[in-house]
Amino acid sequence: MSFINFFRKKKQKLKKPIDFDEIKILTGDKRKEIKEKEKEIFILIKNKIPEFLENLNEKLEVLENVDINSKKVENKIKLIVKENLINYLRYVKTFMEKMENLDEKNFEKFIVNIKQNFLDFDKKSYIGYQKVTFLIGKEIAEVKNSIINFSKYLEKLFSINKEVMQNSKIIFSIELKLKDLEKVKEIINEIEEKIKLKDNRIKKFNDLNEKIIKKIEEIKKSKDHIENLKKQEKIKFDNKELEKEIYKLKEMINFKNLANIFHVSEKKMNFLKDYKENFLENFQKDNGVGILNLINETKMDKQEILNKLENINQKKETIKKFKETIKKDEVKELFIEMEKIKLGVENLKNEKNKELKRYEKFKVSKEEIINLVKKEFSGMN
């Protein structure tokens, strides 16, 4: 049908895009202007549809009352024509119902619905029409011509208002894109706010880190800290001396003699071997109790060993008490705090980078929408 062909999209020569802010203002003004003209077209079509349907219904009644049985053709052909006529009548009535129930307020959707109604009818009724017109040419042609005439009326109406329709489509498309643009802008603002918050948190972390560094420098110069360092050095020295005493104790123990005594016991021999090879480590674990118990089982002279053990334990106790005089290492705790801050800053920077990627993505989308709007608007008269 010629009306259907009218809806085929035609290429338009684009003019130079104008300023985007001006487009937003002009779009609103143009929409008001187009709305008034659309309203006039709406009224014309709405008023024409009842007249069209009444005329079509008269033609349809005539077609329904055609006596196929009176036709001088084979019964097989009559049967085929009857079946196709029933189908054709059903398609026409469905077409009429859809036209009668058109109640779309949006002009673009209204036009699309009309177009789809014609397309559906044309597609479904074509074969039936061809098979029926073989016997009932005049009556069915009257029905078809009624629909074609209405299609031509619409084609002429839209042709007269071609510019309105073209501009209406463009405005409708622009308005959708402007809505998308507002959503994109909202997302961009949200991302900018998130980035700002993360920058503020990073700054606070960095400021805190600077304060900690200054505090560490102050503490390092303090009398208490210097005293603590001296005590820590003394403890290190005392522990080294203590280790020497423990190794002297080892030299006092006759492991060879003990091995000769306990060689019949695999368990005790393994203990002796391990204790001798890892004397410092084992001694620190049990304070020499394990090896002393073995010595007690022998007739070896152990008084000198006991004296050395007592001396070692006294030194350990002295070191322990001296260690208690050392105050809490604030510098160490502050360095731990700095590590936590460093980790926090790294996490925030990673999160910020993710937001920056999203920001760039939506900035590109924003520019694409703006360019599309400019391009579409430049195609309007």
Image: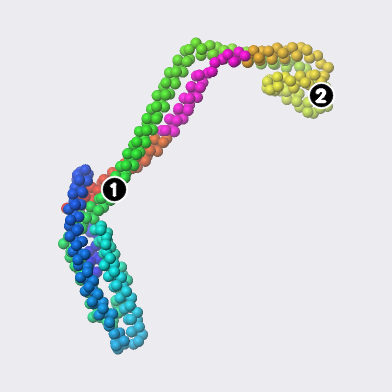
Q: Which residue is mark 2?
A: 262
Residue drawn at 29 percent across, 85 percent down? 67
Residues at circles 1 and 2 in contact by the CB criterion of under 8 Å: no
Position of 8 relative to 71 (above/below):
above
The x and y percentages for residue 320 are 63, 15
324 in magenta: yes
Position of 219 relative to 158 (above/below):
above
Q: Secondary structure at mark 1?
A: helix
Can I make out residue 12 in this image? no
Position of 82 relative to 100 (above/below):
below
The x and y percentages for residue 303 are 78, 12
Residue drawn at 21 percent across, 71 percent down? 52
The x and y percentages for residue 197 are 37, 33
Residue segment shown in magenta = 321-349
Foreground pick, 18 / 16: 18
Can I make out residue 301 in this image? yes
- Amino acid type for the residue under numbered disc 2: Phe
The mark found on residue 229 in the picture is none
- Amino acid type for the residue under numbered disc 1: Lys
Colouring mode (rainbow / by chain / secondary structure / one colour): rainbow
Mark 1 crowdedness (10 Å alpha carbons): few <14, some 14-19, many ≥20? few
Chief secondary structure of the magenta portion: helix
The mark found on residue 179 in the picture is 1
Foreground pick, 218 / 282: 218
Name the quadrant containing residue 134: bottom left
Residue drawn at 40 percent across, 38 percent down? 354
Tell me the CA gap for discs 1 and 2. 94 Å
Quadrant assignment for the N terminus:
bottom left
Between disc 1 and disc 2, whose residue precedes? 1
Position of 28 relative to 334 (above/below):
below
Residue drawn at 76 percent across, 17 percent down? 253
Mark 2 crowdedness (10 Å alpha carbons): few <14, some 14-19, many ≥20? some
